């Protein structure tokens, strides 16, 4: 049996992650948006342990760690969500959600991310 390279597998996985939310309406609240767009990589509790996160290198950010919150402000986090990891010198595997989420939805996601802080 032929094995696909990891990079091809990841591209297919991310393509599915991006397309799946388009097939159904995501909840407009932060928790619902997080579950629709973020949980696959960042996990249910924001620790970076989602099903796709296990295959990523570098691993997704652990949103529960104090160091994460001390090292960046709200504007930086919103920029990563909107423009993707590459826009701020982080992993290009962090998807840019600006075409899908408007500023109000990004703000709602950020508010939800803060619920993971210190857990």
Image (cartoon, rainbow, N blue to C red):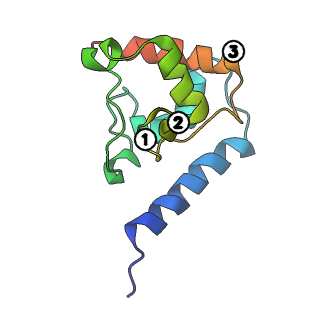
User: Marks 2 and 1: which is nearer the front?
Assistant: 2
Mark found first going from the N terminus, 3 or 1:
1
Q: Point out which mark residue 87 bears.
A: 2
Q: Is residue 101 above or below residue 96?
A: above
Tell me the CA gap for discs 3 and 1. Answer: 22 Å
State left or right for residue 20 relative to residue 34. right
Tell me the crowding category of disc 1: few under 14, some 14 to 19, or many 20 or more residues within 10 angstroms, Cα based: many
Q: Nearer the viewer, residue 74 or 10?
A: 74
Label 2 vs 1, first from the N-terminus: 1
Q: Is residue 34 left or right of residue 91?
A: right
Report if the CB atoms under discs 3 and 1 are less than 8 Å apart.
no
Residue 65 in view (yes/no): no
Residue 12 horizontal side relative to residue 50, left or right:
right
Residue pictured at 55% horizontal, 21% vertical: 78
* Tag in front: 3 or 1: 3
Badge 2 density bin: few <14, some 14–19, many ≥20, Cα 10 Å? some
Mark identifier at residue 92 = none
Q: Which is more N-terminal, label 2 or label 3?
A: 2
Residue matched to label 3: 104
* CA separation in Å, label 2 and label 1: 18 Å
The answer to which quarter of the image holds residue 116 is top left
**Which residue is located at x 61 percent, y 21 percent?**
106
The residue that label 1 is drawn on is: 41
**Secondary structure found at label 2:** helix
Residue 55: % across, % down: 34, 54
């Amino acid at each position: 049996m032929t094995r696909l390279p990891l990079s091809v597998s990841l591209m297919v996985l991310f393509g599915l992650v991006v397309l799946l939310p388009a097939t159904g309406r995501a909840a407009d609240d932060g928790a619902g948006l997080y579950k629709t767009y973020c949980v696959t990589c960042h996990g249910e509790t924001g620790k970076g342990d989602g099903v796709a996160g296990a295959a990523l290198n570098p691993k997704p950010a652990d949103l529960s760690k104090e160091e994460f919150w001390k090292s960046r402000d709200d504007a930086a986090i919103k920029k990563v969500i909107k423009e993707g990891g590459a826009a701020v010198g982080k992993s290009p595997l962090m998807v840019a959600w600006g075409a899908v989420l408007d500023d109000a939805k990004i703000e709602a996601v950020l508010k939800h991310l803060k619920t993971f802080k210190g857990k």
